[in-house]
Amino acid sequence: MLDILKKSAIAAGRAILDIYHSGPEVVYKPDCSPVTDADECAERIILADLAAAFPDIPVVAEESVAAGSIPNISGKTFFLVDPLDGTKEFIGRHNDFTVNIALIESGAPVAGVVYAPALGILYAASGGRALKSVVSETFMVEPETVIGCRSRGDRLVALASRSHNSAETVAYLAEHGITDYEAVGSSLKFCLLAEGLADVYPRFSRTMEWDTAAGDAILRAAGGETLTMEGMPLTYGKRNQATDSDFANPWFVSRGKV
């Protein structure tokens, strides 16, 4: 399965780069979030690949959900897809946007792929192993290496959202005495934790499940965790929530080894 997810993410990323270099067309959804022709093109590629390879596994994909297409996932294994995570980074000509594909079983992300096409980096996870590969300019995947979270030292390094930082995040960093932090876009924050390049990622602004699932799968396989403010693992497949929309996440903190 993981090889198919990797190939699909790379194909989607290749299409995204074509639009990135030629200039995207940007429109805004009812919630005022931006969407581009790259988001839509990449999602079509991924949905076609998943339907061909795994016709019995439902897919929850960001743009399809926005259009009102939500499959029945009750009690089922399913995919979560964000065809272009970090659309604001993409529009702003930053390189830290990604393609995210995750497999969810019993509410947990058990496999995932995060591909950063402009950086030529591919992260993947399944079977409790987290992996990193370099993808060449000709979209050939070089040999992968196993990655893992680092043990915490005396000085913690935090990651924060470039486009969605918040006063609560600043307060959290101050409360925990963290002065060293970097602003990064998209699901790459999970991957940098998984790679042992940082220690904690507090998120006190809104995310959706497709934003986090693939990166969270990689982080968990690398020995890290993502916890809600109640200290419980972040779950996936959340429907009919009393306080928020379907698939919306609560605030959370992702971290490497304790």
Image: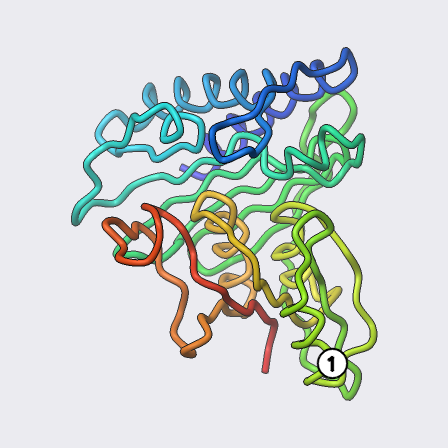
Quadrant in the rendering for residue 118: top right
| Residue at 64% over, 39% down | 86
Establish if 109 lies above or below 120: below
Residue 223 lies in what quarter of the image? Answer: bottom right
What residue is drawn where x is 78% and y is 36%?
A: 95
Q: Is residue 128 above or below residue 57?
A: below
Number of numbered discs overlaid on the protein picture: 1
The percent position of residue 13, horizontal first and vertical second, equals 63, 25
Q: Nearer the viewer, residue 250 or 56?
A: 250
Decide which of 208, 222 is in the foreground and name it.
208
Q: Residue furthest top?
A: 22
Residue 37 is situated, as x and y percent measured from the top left of the image, at 59, 16
On screen, residue 105 versus residue 222, left or right, reads: left
Q: Nearer the viewer, residue 93 or 132?
A: 93
Q: On screen, 97 above or below 18?
A: below
Q: Residue at x 23, y 50 (%)?
A: 240
The quadrant of the image that shows the N terminus is: top left
Mark 1 surroundings: few (<14), some (14-19) or many (≥20) residues within 10 A = few
Residue assigned mark 1: 174
Rendered location of residue 116, percent (x, y): 68, 37
Residue 42 is situated, as x and y percent measured from the top left of the image, at: 54, 21
For the C terminus, the quadrant is bottom right
Residue at the limit of the structure toward the bottom, as seen here: 154
Disc 1 marks a residue whose amino acid type is Ala
In what element is the residue under mark 1? helix
Identify which residue is drawn at 53% across, 27% down: 7
Q: Is residue 126 left or right of residue 34?
A: left
Color scheme of the displayed model: rainbow
In the image, is 123 to the left or to the right of 43?
right
